[in-house]
Every structure is written in C-alpha cells, then in structure tokens.
Image (tube, rainbow, N blue to C red):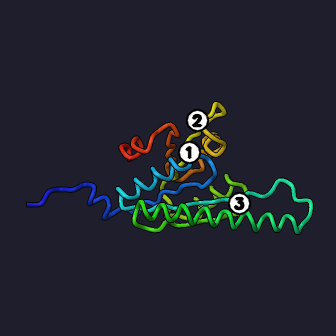
Amino acid sequence: MTSYDADQELRATSNRTFLVVIDDSDEMTKALRYACRRAQHTGGRVALLSVIEPAEFQHWMAVGDLMKEEAREEAESRVNELAAYVHEQTGTMPLLFIREGRLKDELLNLLEEEEQISILVLAAGTTSEGPGPLITALTKSDTVGQLRLPLTIVPAALSEADIDALS
C-alpha cells in the first residue's frame, strides 16, 4: 500500500526559482533563509542577485574605475559566500546574477529577462522609516503592476524557528 505524499509530488514537478536580492541589511538573511526553506520543500531552487550601484561621485576616471573594480570584487565575494550557504541549506547551487546599475531598474530587467524566476523574496526592515527602499519602490502603484510574479515579503522580526515553521 502506498500513501499519497503531496510534498513529494510537488517536489517532483516544481520548477520554482526564488530570487533573493543581496544587500548589506540584517533582514536580507531572513529572506534568504525563507527562500532556501521554500526551495528545499518544493524542489525549487534559489537565485541570488547582487547589484553594484554607480558611485555618487567620480571626480577622476581612474579612481572611479578602481572603485568599480573593488565593488565588483566585494559583490562576487559576498555572492559566493551566500551561494555556499544556499548549497548547504538546499543541496543545490543557486543561480547567480551580478549586475551594474540602479537596483530597482536592474531587478525589474532581470525579472523580465529570466523567465525561470517565479517568486521574488524580500525581507522588510524593522525601522520606523518603513519596510525598506526596495520594497517601497516595488509596491508603488506604478511599479507593482509591472511585476509578473508574486512578491513575498518576510517580516524581519521573525526568528529562524518562525521562518522554518512557515516555510
């Protein structure tokens, strides 16, 4: 006698890719954990996006080039570090994207270009300033309609145990 295992069936047919935007915020790790757990439980995978934003001031071209190179090295190092975490959590390597430009623009471009990305996972900040600049930008009425996929917002106040229970 065999029992019906809905989770096993979902894992076998899922092609969900959970995109997490990498930044230096504390709450980003909450989004990453949630995405890893969802990918693990659904047979999906995780994708990581790091965006190198242009420097505000570039007085000399050589200095600007050096700053850009250093920013790219830092982004690659951080993405590789987080990719190892994703592999440890899910057993698969994530898709990696490093882009240069404005964060919102590059994120929207990536979502348009990469059809395999099916869910965007972000974490809300806990400050009185609001959920964070990216969530604020994406949930404005002129932008939210451009999204072709669900946006999952993970509250930063959740503990790892809370995230594990939800995902």
In the image, what residue occupies the spot 53% across and 53% down? 148
Picture quadrant where residue 110 is located: bottom right
Closer to the camera: disc 3 or disc 1?
Answer: 1
Picture quadrant where residue 162 is located: top left
Furthest toward the top, the residue is 128
The earlier-in-sequence mark between 3 and 1 is 1
Relative placement, left or right, of 48 versus 17 is: right
Q: Amino acid at mark 3?
A: Ile
Q: Amino acid at mark 1?
A: Glu
Residue that badge 3 annotates: 52
Q: Which quarter of the figure is the N terminus placed in?
A: bottom left
Furthest toward the left, the residue is 1
Relative placement, left or right, of 8 versus 18 is: left
Q: Residue 132 placed where, x, y %?
A: 63, 41
Residue that badge 1 annotates: 27
Q: Amino acid at mark 2?
A: Thr
Residue that badge 2 annotates: 126
* Callout 2: SS: loop
In the image, what residue occupies the spot 71% across and 60% down? 52
Relative placement, left or right, of 117 versus 50 is: left
Q: Residue 71 placed where, x, y %?
A: 73, 63
Q: Residue 22 placed where, x, y %?
A: 60, 55
Relative placement, left or right, of 25 versus 155 is: right
